[in-house]
Amino acid sequence: MTDPIYTPVLIVGGGPVGFALALDLAWRNCHSTLIERDPGTATQLLAKANGLDERTLEHLRRWKLVERVEEVGFPPDHPGDTVYATSLNGFYIGRSHMPSARERRTPEFTPQKRQRCPQYEFDPLLANAVKERRLTNILYSSVFERLEQDESGVTATISNAETGELSSIRADYLVACDGAGSRIRQQLGIPFVGKMLDFSLSAMIRIPHLELKPPMSGGERYILIGRSGAWAVFTSVDGRHIWRITVVGSQDRLDASTYDIGADIRRALGSDDIPFEVLRLIPWRRSQCNAASYRSGRVLLAGDAAHTMSPTGGHGMNTGIGDVSDLGWMLEALASRWGGEGLLDAYDIERRPIGLRNARSSTANYEVWVQNGDYENVFTAGATGDACRKRIADFFVKSLHSEWNSTGVALGYRYEGSPIIIADGTPPTPDDPSDYIQTARPGHRAPHAWLSDGRSTLDLFGREFVLLCFSRDVDVARIEGAAFDLRVPLKTTQIDDSGIATLYERKLVLVRPDGHVAWRADQVPDDCHALLNTVRGAKVIPH
Ligand SMILES: Cc1cc2nc3c(=O)[nH]c(=O)nc-3n(C[C@H](O)[C@H](O)[C@H](O)COP(=O)(O)OP(=O)(O)OC[C@H]3O[C@@H](n4cnc5c(N)ncnc54)[C@H](O)[C@@H]3O)c2cc1C
């Protein structure tokens, strides 16, 4: 084996989470190396994530990628309704209305609305953005084999997927973004705690001609209901000809080589005569698991390597992108030597509860899907059948409201009890999956408001700590002086807008590079060095 190559951060896994981390680091002018076992990105049609939530869009706004997502994403005029039906050619049961991307108003609490963008478009989009920044060494066909770590770094052994040749990479930090089956998590012996929900299958399908008439038309997804309840979801992936069918799974592992997905597709279409082509069939396991720790020494876990959740809600990838948005600035702070080791403990303390929270919310949605109910007359014509279908529609529309409206999950997470956040004793806002209440309470995402120059307050955050100052009476020189002494990048921004001042509630609000509030008060503290030492993780916390 040749001498190891050196990199400050080694990212293992080139899925959306690995590339999002590489991008965030590159955006912060940090070098990294990303290894991926496949020969390229999205080399096969991924039958996975479709939805980017508001928080992911806010990160994409920072990385200047929103327009690219809009270009490759879903047609802006395609309705977003979820239709409940026995099949696409069968009994219509009801619908949850959701306007098209064009009709949907951007909520007042964010500059970005959620977007549909299939993962087979999103992953290459991220990968290309990383390549353009030229700070990431991307090594495809490179398989992580094992690691060893000591006090000063991590050495990873890599094999070439084609030749089997071994090499090694030495890194200050290694981030495992290697998916749900994470070899790294297993090698470190970190328990993956939770429960198995079912075994499922998803197929990507091309249907050249599918004409649906009202009331069946206009769905972005169709939840298909039979006598034993919801059995599949049929989703438009590109708003045109590509669809995905996902079967609500079974307790037994499904064997893709023998499974008759064609029969399911014909059952979903309600017809044997509509031509279709199965592009890809993927068996997968639905589970709700969370790593017992997101950190082991200099190794961090992120994305599906750290947590799995049912796709009911579309939170898996979004949560992973949230992980690395927390981690990116911390790794940069450590690389630039203004951050302390306490940041890495904080990463675990901040993100692990969020993995758990989002997974619980996803399972709650899944439980609605598989709930026993009275479906006996779902195929019966006439008044008896109509009454049954109305009951089913009412149940699903009400119970799945938080699956289709999950802004609270996307934006309302908060870093309670973090050692690098200074709590101010105010009570938390309710943590509701659908309703989001903006607050500048420490630990929460700093609120969005439009500034007089047309920017969002969120556009102020990202590269450094930002001290928002809503009063001309406070002298922040001592905080700025402490930041200078400790080499903490800090920018003070004066905002003379009473509406935004009311939203932020204090005269001084310190926002971290990831856009979360670290501290707020009406006065400069006595010990400004202590304040900054806390938020930069300089206090060493035993692990
Ligand atoms: C049907 C379905 C629908 C979904 N819908 C949504 C949705 O709408 N919204 C949402 O947010 N999420 C959704 N998800 C979840 C989402 O797809 C995952 O959460 C996301 O892909 C996780 O990204 P990741 O980068 O952490 O892991 P992965 O996407 O699994 O990527 C891991 C990468 O690591 C590589 N790798 C693994 N082992 C090694 C190794 N030893 N060496 C080198 N490379 C390695 C793999 O090849 C892979 O490229 C859905 C999932 C499914 C199954």
Image (cartoon, grey):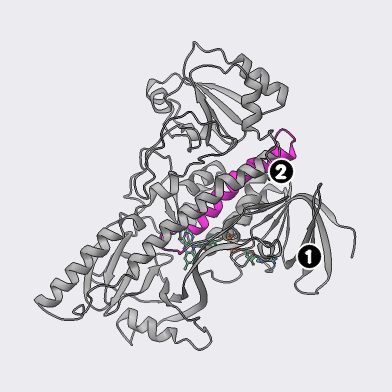
Badge 2 amino acid: Cys
Question: Would the CB of label 2 be found within 8 Å of ligand 1?
Answer: no
In the rendered image, the residue lying farthest to the left is 383
Is disc 2 placed on a helix, strand or loop? loop
Magenta span dominant secondary structure: helix
Check residue 31 for magenta coloring. no
Does any portion of residue 219 appear in the rendered image? yes
Note whether 393 is above or below 112 in the view shown: below
Residue drawn at the location 34% of the way across and 55% of the way down: 402
Q: Is residue 103 left or right of residue 195?
A: left
Where is residue 420 shown, x and y percent of the image?
60, 35
Give the farthest residue toward the front.
Answer: 542
Q: Does the CB distance between marks 2 and 1 fall below 8 Å? A: no
Quadrant occupied by the N terminus = bottom right
Q: Is mark 1 within 8 Å of ligand 1?
A: yes
Estimate the x, y position of residue 171 in percent, counting from the top left. Answer: 78, 51
According to the picture, the residue beneath numbered tag 1 turns out to be 158
Residue at screen point 44% across, 59% down:
314
The residue that disc 2 covers is: 30
- Looking at this view, name the residue that lies furthest to the right: 2
Q: Is residue 70 above or below residue 456?
A: below
* Residue range of the region highlighted in magenta in the rendering: 310-339
Q: Position of residue 119 (x, y in %)?
A: 52, 62
